[in-house]
Image (cartoon, rainbow, N blue to C red):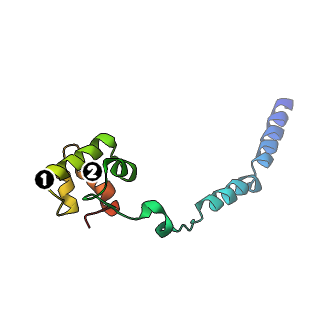
Amino acid sequence: MKNIRMVMMSVIAAGAMLSAPAFSEPAKQQEAVQKPVTMQVADSPSAAAVNINTADAATLAERLNGVGLKKAQAIVSFREQNGPFKSVDDLVNVTGIGEATLEKNKGLISIN
C-alpha cells in the first residue's frame, strides 16, 4: 500500500513539473525564431547578377553557388574559345557545369 502511495505521489509530482506552463515557454521562443526577418537585399554587393561574359574566374568562383575556381576557370576558357555566351542556358556547355548548377545560379547570372 505504501508503495502504491509513493508511486501515485511520484506521478502527481511529475505531472506538476510537466504542466502546460512549462511547455508554453519554449513555444514562445520558437515563435520568436520563426518571425520573418526583413533584409535589404538590393543594397548587398552580391545582389547584382554576375556577368558571365565579362567576369574573371575569381569573381565567378566567389559569387556563384557550387562553382569553385576550377569550374570558374573552365567558364572563362570556354568563353575565350567560343565567344560570349548568348544565353544563360549556354553555361551547361561548359565542362563541369550541369543543369543543377545552372538552376542554383540562374538568378545570379547575366549575360549583359
**In the rendering, at what x and y percent does residue 83 appear?**
15, 56
Eye-nearest disc, 1 or 2: 1
* Vertical side of 79 occupied by 69: above or below: above
Q: Position of residue 69 (x, y in %)?
A: 33, 42
Badge 1: how crowded within 10 Å, few (<14), some, or many (20+)? few
Q: Position of residue 40 (x, y in %)?
A: 52, 68
Quarter where residue 106 is shown: bottom left
Question: Which amino acid is tagged 1?
Answer: Asn
In the image, 54 versus 101, the foreground residue is 54
Position of the C terminus by quadrant: bottom left
Which residue is nearer to you in this view: 62 or 56?
A: 56
Q: Name the residue carrying label 2.
A: 100
Residue 59 in percent (x, y) is at 36, 52
Residue 54 badge: none
Identify the amino acid type marked 2: Ala
Instruction: Work out whether 16 lies above or below 44.
Output: above
Label 2 CA crowd tier, 10 Å (few <14, some 14–19, many 20+): few
Which is nearer the N-term, disc 1 or disc 2?
1
Residue at image x 29%, y 40%?
70
Q: Quadrant of the N terminus?
A: top right
- State the SS at label 1: helix
Q: Which residue has dot 1 on it?
A: 82
> Which residue ends up furthest to the left in the rendered image?
82
Q: Name the residue nearer the viewer: 91 or 31.
A: 91
Left or right placement of residue 82 versus residue 15 in this view: left
Residue at 31% from the left image edge and 51% from the top image edge? 56
Task: In the rendered view, tell whether residue 62 sits above or below residue 38.
Answer: above
SS type, badge 2: helix
